[in-house]
Amino acid sequence: MKQQRIRIIMGLVLAVVMITIVFSLCGLVARAEGNTTAVTKENYMSDNQYAALGFGSLKDPAAFSAEDTSNPLEGYTANTLSELFVGQMNKNDDKDDYIGSFQIMENASTADSNTLNLNNMAKNTIGKIQGYYDADNSDDMYTQCKNTIALRPGKISETNASTRDIIIEDTLYCLEDGWFYEDDSYQMVNAWTLGDDGKYTMSDHKAYNVKLDDDNWVGDIEVKQAEGLTAMAVGDFDGDDYYEVAVHALDNSGGQIIFFQPKANGSAYELKQENYSIRIGDIGNRFKFDGMEGDLERPIVQLTTTSMSGQDDLAISVSLPYDDGNEYCDSSALAIYSCQNGNTSRRFNNDLVVNNNEYRFKFPSTTNADLNGDGTDELVVAGNKNYGYKNYDTKGSISKSENLVNVVLYNGSGYELAWSKPKNLHANELVVSEDKMNAPVALTAARYNSEQSGDTLFCEGVYYHFSGASGATANEIIKNGKLTCNEKEDYDFGEEVQEIKNDNGLDYIRAYAPYISKAVTASFVEDSRMTEQTLVVSGTDSRNSFSNSDWADIDIAWVYGKNGDLIQEVTNPRYVDSQDEDDNGTLLTFCAINVDDDTVYTRYTGKNVGWSSPSVESVMLSTPYWSELDYGTAGNARGATSYSLTVSNGSGTGNSGNIGLGLGYTFGGGVGFLGTGGSMGFSLDGSAAYTHSFQNTKTQSDTLTFTSGGGNDVVGLTVTPVAIYN
């Protein structure tokens, strides 16, 4: 989902200098291997001029070494500008039942309510399928819901800008093949491949097309419930340098996670099932069900790939329906599995219960998030707060005012929760999560503005911001930190929903069961490719009639940053307009996908190094005193002044007087970015050139104090060793 960010941590600084490293991408270039690199030394002024200002012995930092030709972006994932996959069926009254389409919409040129309107984005498509209603055009097949995810085929280490993502599709449908034309329930997983002609082809090979049982329970799944029964995630789970897709496969004994890898078959790809799998019931006996035939009350699953341990592991969030039934009223779980070399092993398992069943997570989900801005993602788990329950008896209540959030960390040998008790955080008052079968909470993370250090969490319509604290390691900073939110930022649904609330009150609009079913984050905007945007799918039971709860209205909104602010706009109110929520094939699915050549790759060609122009750090003026009197040593005499720089371990944006490593990452520029060949070469005044770039500081604790003797006016200067990596 997210690109890996650069992380560099400096050692202890013992001189009055700052180390600033600026990375510049050299345009849109393909990856090139084996390029020669060069180190060019170019100070701002001559050695004699530096010496005249008191810098008589400027020692070259390690970054100045001509022997150091290492690529500072080694392991950095290319910046992907994503397109938007949109699949829809029975969207409005202009279409027949069970008929729809999918299309790949080109990324927007800029972020605003006009360019991000799906009706406008649909005018510029890269590929689409019309008549998207079933897999084999059978009149007896009725699609109920779909989930989609993008996967880059081929060897990961050899993919390039011309490699296109394929679409993996998980479909639940009914088929008239029983006695007296009764509908039976099925699940199918297949791949779509985009051809050079702009047309999509579905593999004739059905990787997975399984009859679930002789009952049409699939036909009762509502639009807002589909996410919990069609979960997927992509990763190199077995470590063979190829991506696999993990799929939640349903069955009548709790279900399992199965894995597929795409294999080329002519110009298209087909999915080959791997020989390893994970039973949901192995996470906990409470998820082992017998005799669930015909019953929609099944384990609700959400999947996320985590790479914290240095390999792709699979995080599985599982919840039971919100019901008083004995077999369903039990705790949720979060488990993390390794599948290296095709051998599955559980590396973490937690039932997400707090204070001996005082309260617990309900409908949990996870997402990757770089909370502290150090370039490494943590795994965030969030859920609704369930309290007042009794296992195997009473389901209790879902809090209307609080969500539960915790963070999973990797400590070098295993996974652990950052906080012994989860954070009880403000919840969006409009969201209703009290259905028996509910989707996992809509959770994502994004860096909406380039000025942000860490990601912002979006959890069911609330934005959480991480505030770091002191700590010797990144994990300690997370453990000592906290999450905060501004309730005024809450996602407020569409204008129509707000009007109903304002006219009739909160309880009245909650009767429409407002929900947020999906949040998709990627870089979708051309002129903001170094930041991310989130598409939000929200809805209610039909607003045309208070009593008609079997119909759904669905809005599309976007969340993005602009000039440091967080912007949220409902660009497509009633994108799905009063359609049956569990009949006629009503569905809506989105995912980020990359099928064109707009990915940014970097090629390291060398670096320019040198000392910057002197910068005035302080001016210390002597105060009046009587020189005839003895006040002790000159350094402590009356009239002496001092100036201190205190630096603490942590992260932040900008340098703010800190002596540390400022990391500036800019898009575009090249060698002349800071005017290295001109009079402004290596001048800190050039910082204006990257005002909108992402800058992060990491320092260790140190305090430097300068004291001037009485009778002396002193100016403190700093110079900065600069390495510009091209």
Image: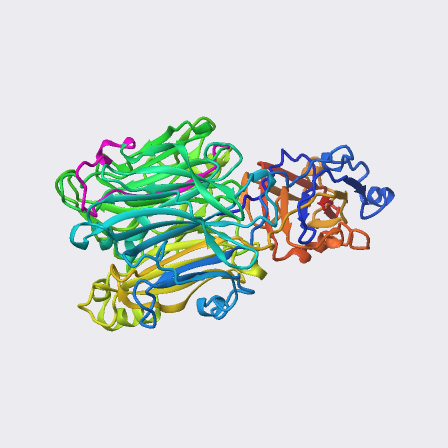
Q: Which residue is more in the foreground, 676 or 114?
A: 114
Total label count? 0
Q: Which residue is more in the foreground, 58 or 102?
A: 102
Residues in magenta, as a range: 282-310
Magenta: main secondary structure = loop
The type of colouring in the image is rainbow
The image quadrant of residue 87 is bottom left
Q: Is residue 179 left or right of residue 695?
A: left
Q: Is residue 623 left or right of residue 545?
A: right
Q: Is residue 497 above or below residue 178?
A: below
Residue 621 in percent (x, y) is at 70, 50
Q: Which residue is more in the foreground, 460 or 44?
A: 460
Residue 291 magenta: yes
Q: Is residue 496 above or below residue 539?
A: below
Q: Is residue 411 above or below residue 454?
A: above
Residue at image point 49% right, 39% down: 243
Q: Which residue is more in the foreground, 159 or 572?
A: 159
Q: Is residue 522 left or right of residue 709?
A: left
Residue 489 in percent (x, y) is at 39, 60
Residue 393 in percent (x, y) is at 12, 40
Residue 697 magenta: no
The image quadrant of residue 572 is bottom left
Residue at image point 40% right, 42% down: 304
Residue 618 in percent (x, y) is at 69, 49
